Amino acid sequence: MRILIRYFFRTLRAVLTPFLLLGDKLTTPKSIERDPAHQARVDAETSELALYQFPACPFCVKVRRAMKRLALNIELRNAQHAGEHRDALIAGGGKAQVPCLRIPRPDGSVEWMYESGDIIRYLEDRFGEDTRQAAS
């Protein structure tokens, strides 16, 4: 019975994945516009961030859409299959759960932030439009 359930969900995921990715492409949000100097500062701040994700994970899609809306250039690391990125995610964050945002701190430590809602809240607090107006 367990194997039937596993194959059912694998088949369901295989059928729905193209629709999820197509829907994401067709409904990509518009990015906020910043002046070039402020965008350069944001790009410098996001250069060390990395999002560990799976391409067809709905929670990862949600975070990527928030990144697009906030005009953030954060490196995407596909941790779906065994390899360098998955190993780094498990070694650093302790589990192979996605999405996970890797945030290096000034003191040299690294925070591994899981949960799409927490990641989006962090990105909006740090790089959202209110931050843009405060920096101007």
Image: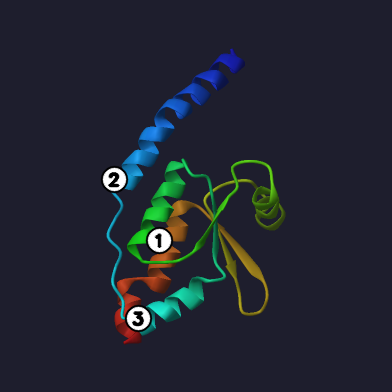
Using the rendered view, name the quadrant where residue 102 is placed.
bottom right
The structure residue drawn at horizontal position 60% and vertical position 17%, both measured from the top left corner, is: 2
5, above or below 69, in the image? above
Q: Point out the frontmost of discs 1 and 2.
A: 2
Residues at badges 1 and 2 in contact (C-beta under 8 Å)? no
Marks 3 and 2, the one that precedes in the sequence: 2
Using the rendered view, name the quadrant where residue 4 is placed.
top right
Tell me the CA gap for discs 3 and 2: 27 Å
Q: Secondary structure at mark 1?
A: helix
The mark total stands at 3
The amino acid sitting under disc 3 is: Pro
Residues at badges 1 and 3 in contact (C-beta under 8 Å)? no
The structure residue drawn at horizontal position 35% and vertical position 85%, both measured from the top left corner, is: 135
Marks 1 and 3, the one that precedes in the sequence: 3
What is the x, y in percent for residue 123?
Answer: 43, 66
Q: Residues within 10 Å of mark 2 (few under 14, many from 20)?
A: few
The structure residue drawn at horizontal position 52% and vertical position 51%, both measured from the top left corner, is: 99
The label on residue 36 is 3
Tell me the CA gap for discs 1 and 3: 18 Å
The structure residue drawn at horizontal position 43% and vertical position 34%, both measured from the top left corner, is: 17
The label on residue 67 is 1
Q: Which residue is mark 2?
A: 26
Tell me the CA gap for discs 1 and 2: 16 Å
Residue at the far top in the pictured view: 1
- Can you say which quadrant of the picture contains the N terminus? top right
Marks 1 and 2, the one that precedes in the sequence: 2
